[in-house]
Amino acid sequence: MGRIFREAKHVMCWLGRDDSSVANDCFRFIRNARIAMEQEFQPEWTMGNLIRDTKLLGVSKTAREWDLVAQLFGISWFQRVWIVQEVALAKACYLCWGTYQVHFYEALSVASWLAYSIHAPSPNKGARVGKLISDVFIDIMHTFDNRPTWRDMILFSKILEDLHPARKQLYVDLLFYARSLQVTDQRDVIYSSLGSPLAHSFNGEVMVTPDYTEPWEQQQIRAAKALLRNSREGPYVLSMIIHDSEAELLDDQIPSWVPRWNTFDKTSNRPVPLTSTYEYRQKPFRASLGSPLFNPTFPSPDILSVTGWKYDTVAWVSSRLKFVDLQGDLEDWKPHLGEKNTTPIELAWLQLLDKTSMPPEELIRPFSVTLARGRPASDDHVDDLLLYCERLRSKAGTETISPFPPSSPTLGDLSNAERSIPRSRDRRLAMTALGRMALVPLIAEANDICCIVQGMDVPIVLRNATNGTY
């Protein structure tokens, strides 16, 4: 099928009937918005310009037009995993809604502006628009290398390429973001992306060949072993593991070291992998710097053997880290607010203050850099966090005195905080026996072991099992 889409002159994507008679207005508005972008955009602009300077002057910002765009991106077609291959391999691609059509690149250009610009309205289903750009386009379609392609027509394509260079992307990243889409057969989370170069080993062979006679559980084990043995992917596979429960950790059918490549449901935890961000790609962590290469072996079918160093022990974990969307509706916040409208991030901060004797002025830096998930070149992330927390308190109407250190009203970049801090969701904050602060999986608990694995950039958390295994 991949060859059919790659060689076709045009790919027409049927979105469904236009029962509300809105497709013509929606597509005309998208074309006008794209033209306005082209008039404003400068070739030398960077992501900062996309965020702050692309205003779409002369384009309506009223709810009706942008709700039509949100209605378009709310169509279930955009959530199907197979659109990855159908669209990404196309030379030219059109969206067909009822009797009307628009270039796919025009729709994605508008979605890029909605996802990043501070001047964009917040249409209904705005989070879905952002997911379309980040999960589907940047992390999946952007990894395909077919030419010519409609992807080169996207106005911000060069910016996105600079931010997310294809040479630094990984197949495990692609698979993680494919989990946010919909499939009929769970095995297609893997098989739907075989058209991406990342699905292939250096010799050109597909790492996980299709086999629909194989049960899903066996596919997961086979995929894990293939990825772990691959020199590009291997050091990152264990960082993709998410256990939603203790029962899943102890599942007899799938070993605990095997990532589950199935679709997320409404109850799934969705922690963003520590290696799957722009900041990491620009300045990777190097926990095992200087050690030999990652070299896994399999002493038996269900056991993975790696070399590592136990360097600390988990002493305390916080409650689950949750975040509310600062631009979201206050009504959506209410289930997540604590007593006296205390915000989730403030609850985590209060728990931390209760577990340490360190004064807030000293504690805020490790707290901030841990949530920011990296080592920024400066301490600006502290100012960003403090501004972010104060804005949250103000919008929530928190009735207590702020427990955070005082901040300067002239410092801090709110957009940086909004982008980076919430990526720590669905983890726990932890303190170790030696006084380190870390983000750990939701199922982590006191006495778990902190380990650096030879050849891996990010430490992992282990739990004692039996006979010297974890």
Image (cartoon, rainbow, N blue to C red):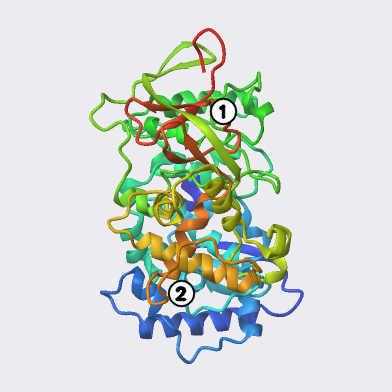
Kindly identify which residue carries mark 2. Answer: 117
Foreground label between 1 and 2: 2
In percent of width and height, residue 186 lies at 64, 37
- Is residue 92 visible in this depiction of the protein? no
Closer to the camera in the image, 276 or 189 = 276
x, y (%) of residue 417?
45, 63
Q: Is residue 443 visible?
A: yes
For mark 1, give the secondary structure.
helix
**Position in image of residue 144 (x %, y %):** 40, 50
Within 10 Å of the Cα at label 2, are there few (<14), some (14-19), or many (20+) other Cα atoms? Answer: many
Could you tell me the amino acid type at mark 1?
Gln
In percent of width and height, residue 254 lies at 61, 23
Q: Is residue 458 above or below residue 128?
A: above
For residue 457, above or below residue 451: below
Out of 216 and 128, give the one closest to the viewer. 128
Left or right position of 77 against 356: right
Task: Determine the secondary structure under disc 2.
Answer: loop
